[in-house]
Image (cartoon, rainbow, N blue to C red):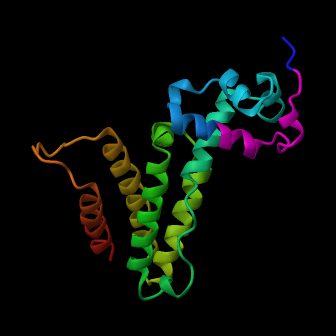
C-alpha cells in the first residue's frame, strides 16, 4: 500500500535521526518498550517504515542504541565554581537531575541497564571525574567514585521503577528520601 502524502506532511520537519529517536521515545514513554515496532514508529512519523531504514540502516538495533544514547547521555556535570570546594554539591545536583531524566524515560531504563552503549556512559563518567579532580580528589579515587555514583543512580532508578520494597518494609517507600540517603553515603565516602 502506497501512502499518499497528507496535507500535514508539508508542514512537518524532514525525517532525521533526531526526529526518529524522539518519536520512538514517545512510543516507549507512552506505551512501553514492547510496543515499539518499526511499523508503529513509521505510523507515528507518518512515513513508511522502510523510510526509517534510510537513517538507521541497522534497523531496530540501531534505534535501540539511539534510545540508550539519548536517555543515558546525562548532561555534563557542572563545570563552574561548583567544581572546586563544593564538588559534593555539584555531584548531588547532577545525580538528582540524572535520576529525574532516567525516571522520565523509565521505559528505556531496561536498555540503559542491559545494552552495551559505552559512549554515553563513558562521557558521563569523564564529566564526573573532572568535577572530582577539580575538588582535589585523587585520580584513582575519582575514577572509582564516578563509576560508583553512576551505578548508584542507574541502579536506584531500576529498583524505583520496579517498585520494590526490598527492605521488607510494610510501608510505602519514600523514594526521594531513600535516594538522598544513599547518595549522601556515596558522596561522604568519596574522599
The number of callouts visible is: 0
Is residue 35 among the parts visible in the rendering? yes
Residue at the (32%, 38%) spot, across then down: 162
- Asked if residue 131 lies left or right of residue 184, the reply is right
Residue 139 to residue 38: above or below: below
- Asked if residue 42 lies left or right of residue 14, the reply is left
Q: Which residues are magenta?
A: 4-23
Residue 16 to residue 37: above or below: below
Residue 45 to residue 13: above or below: above
Residue at the (25%, 67%) spot, across then down: 185
- Asked if residue 172 lies left or right of residue 96, the reply is left
Is residue 137 among the parts visible in the rendering? no
Question: How far across and how far down the image is residue 145, in percent?
Answer: 39, 66
Viewer-proximal residue, 34 or 144?
34
Q: Quadrant of residue 177?
A: bottom left
Q: Quadrant of residue 40?
A: top right
Question: How far across and how far down the image is residue 80, in percent?
Answer: 56, 84
Viewer-proximal residue, 39 or 64?
39
Question: How far across and how far down the image is residue 51, in percent?
Answer: 83, 27
Q: Is residue 101 magenta?
A: no
Q: Quadrant of the N terminus?
A: top right
Q: Quadrant of the C terminus?
A: bottom left
Viewer-proximal residue, 66 or 187?
66
Residue at the (51%, 25%) spot, across then down: 34
Which residue appears farthest toward the top when viewing the image?
Answer: 1
Q: Is residue 17 magenta?
A: yes
Residue 171 to residue 79: above or below: above
Amino acid at each position: 500500500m502506497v501512502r499518499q502524502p497528507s496535507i500535514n506532511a508539508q508542514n512537518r520537519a524532514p525525517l532525521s535521526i533526531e526526529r526518529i529517536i524522539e518519536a520512538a521515545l514517545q512510543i516507549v514513554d507512552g506505551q512501553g518498550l514492547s510496543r515499539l515496532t518499526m511499523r508503529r514508529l513509521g505510523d507515528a512519523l507518518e512515513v513508511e517504515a522502510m523510510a526509517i531504514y534510510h537513517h538507521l540502516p541497522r534497523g531496530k538495533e540501531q534505534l535501540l542504541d539511539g534510545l540508550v544514547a539519548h536517555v543515558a547521555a546525562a548532561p555534563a556535570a557542572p563545570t563552574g565554581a561548583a567544581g572546586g570546594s563544593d564538588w559534593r554539591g555539584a555531584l548531588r545536583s547532577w545525580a538528582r537531575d540524572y535520576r529525574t531524566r532516567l525516571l522520565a524515560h523509565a521505559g528505556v531504563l531496561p536498555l540503559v541497564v542491559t545494552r552495551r552503549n559505552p559512549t554515553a556512559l563513558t562521557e558521563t563518567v569523564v564529566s564526573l571525574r573532572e568535577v572530582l579532580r577539580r575538588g582535589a580528589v585523587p585520580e584513582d579515587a575519582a575514577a572509582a567514585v564516578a563509576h560508583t555514583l553512576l551505578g548508584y543512580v542507574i541502579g536506584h532508578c531500576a529498583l524505583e521503577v520496579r517498585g520494590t520494597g526490598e527492605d521488607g518494609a510494610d510501608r510505602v517507600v519514600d523514594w526521594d528520601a531513600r535516594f538522598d540517603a544513599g547518595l549522601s553515603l556515596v558522596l561522604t565516602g568519596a574522599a
